[in-house]
Amino acid sequence: MIHLISLEKLSTIIKKRKTTTFDKEVIENTQRILEDIRRHGLSSVHKWSMKFDKLKPVIYQKDDFKKSWKYFKDKELFIEFKKRIELFHKVQMPYPLEIDIGEVKLKLIWKPIERIGLYVPGGKYPYISTLFMGAIPAKIAGVKKIIVTSPIHDEKILDTYLASCYLLDIDKFVTVGGIQAIGGMAYGTFGYSVDKIIGPGNIYVQAAKRELYGTVGIDMIAGPTELIVLADETSPPERIAFDMLAQAEHGKHSIIILLDTSHKHMNQIYNIYIKYYNEDMAETYFTHITVLRDALDFINSFGPEHLLIASKKLIKVSEKIHNVGTISLLTPPAFSDYSAGLNHILPTKSVSRYRGALTVYDFLKPIQIIEGYDKEGLHFSSKISLLEGMNYHTKSLKTLE
């Protein structure tokens, strides 16, 4: 649906959307299926996959990837796509840190997570961008093994994925989706247990990730697409309308918001938008704003996945935005979804309050190292341990004083 609405009313509606919640039935079904997979392994994965997707899980490996790549027609396109994503993610790699405090050497080094599970949603088309944007930062970080799962029925789509897995040096690809894919990766059903699971997916995929957090790490609980556009009378109406439609086509559970400083300009965009909009597209809100500060407060409270600032005059206000996945400055968000080099695996549902886009850091662990000790530090430490009632800590430290 499309709504013309005040900022005050919009704020009230949005408050209800801020967190990802799962109803009792989703939680209970997810727990039941995961427990069945934990107990019965691959036979359970097969059972649930056939029931929900009418799909027999098949595990493909490196020899299969090589065969698909050999006859793949889009080699050049995919190689260039990979290069663009690599450029931005390679510069993210952190350096080790070291500091001497008297006779004490303190270090911080980074080590990669060893095994990753990447979920790619199913559909009528191959979601190559999600596969590349999940796998490339993991490989740059030094991850040794990656299992990819996706509920693929179509042979042509499958072949595209297998060829991509060759290019990305993936370890295994499994034709399975939903809870059974997440459970299978976590419990070692496909050959080994992964250490962390990443990737978008439907409510059952996200519920399974949440249930398994602790058994494995996860990237985030991701919801439907979100876009806020901040515009004024200088923003080209047709371009803004299509930027909004590009994100609206993700589906009716997504949300698109236009915040426009000009009522007349907002109506121009609205009139173009409704010509192409259909009922399968995102919930969309058109809002005229009179106080820019109120709009910025709303954006930070919402914490959208995407923010498009569609006016040169408004670019500076991006410095006042603290909660967001990606900020696009006069740039179509669809570009950052694909070949800009950024990552489009982004926080939704206000998760941007405490984390951002997927980066190489999602696949790295900081490890602290200490070497040596000094008298002053030992003295302070023994005093503090005594205050905390840790008597053997105190005795351990005093043996060195």
Image (cartoon, grey):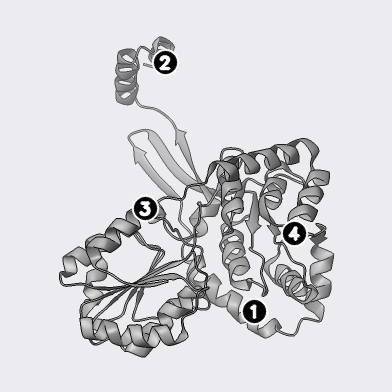
Nearest-to-viewer mark from 1 and 4: 4
Q: Is residue 30 above or below residue 56?
A: above
Q: Earlier in the sequence, mark 4 or mark 3?
A: 3
Residue 332 x %, y %: 41, 80
Q: Is residue 4 left or right of residue 66?
A: left
Whether residue 332 is visible here, answered yes or no, is no
Question: Which residue lies under the disc numbered 1?
Answer: 79
Cα gap from disc 2 to disc 1, whole angstroms = 56 Å
Q: Nearer the viewer, residue 328 or 208?
A: 208
Residue at 52%, 46% (x, y): give it.
Answer: 22
Q: Residues within 10 Å of mark 3 (few under 14, many from 20)?
A: few
Q: Earlier in the sequence, mark 3 or mark 1?
A: 3
Question: Which residue lies under the disc numbered 2?
Answer: 393
Q: Earlier in the sequence, mark 2 or mark 1?
A: 1
* Quadrant assignment for the N terminus: bottom left
Question: Which residue lies under the disc numbered 4?
Answer: 53
Q: Is residue 38 left or right of residue 136?
A: right
Nearest-to-viewer mark from 2 and 1: 1
Residue 336 x %, y %: 46, 75
Q: Earlier in the sequence, mark 3 or mark 2?
A: 3
Cα gap from disc 3 to disc 1, whole angstroms = 43 Å
Q: Is residue 374 above or below residue 70?
A: above
Cα gap from disc 4 to disc 3, whole angstroms = 32 Å
Nearest-to-viewer mark from 3 and 2: 3
Q: As shown in the figure, which amino acid type bears the numbered disc 2?
A: His
Residue 183 x %, y %: 69, 46
Cα gap from disc 3 to disc 2, whole angstroms = 49 Å
The circle on residue 111 is none
- Element carrying mark 1: helix
Question: Which residue lies under the disc numbered 3?
Answer: 16
In which image quadrant can residue 59 be found? bottom right
Whether residue 161 is visible here, answered yes or no, is yes
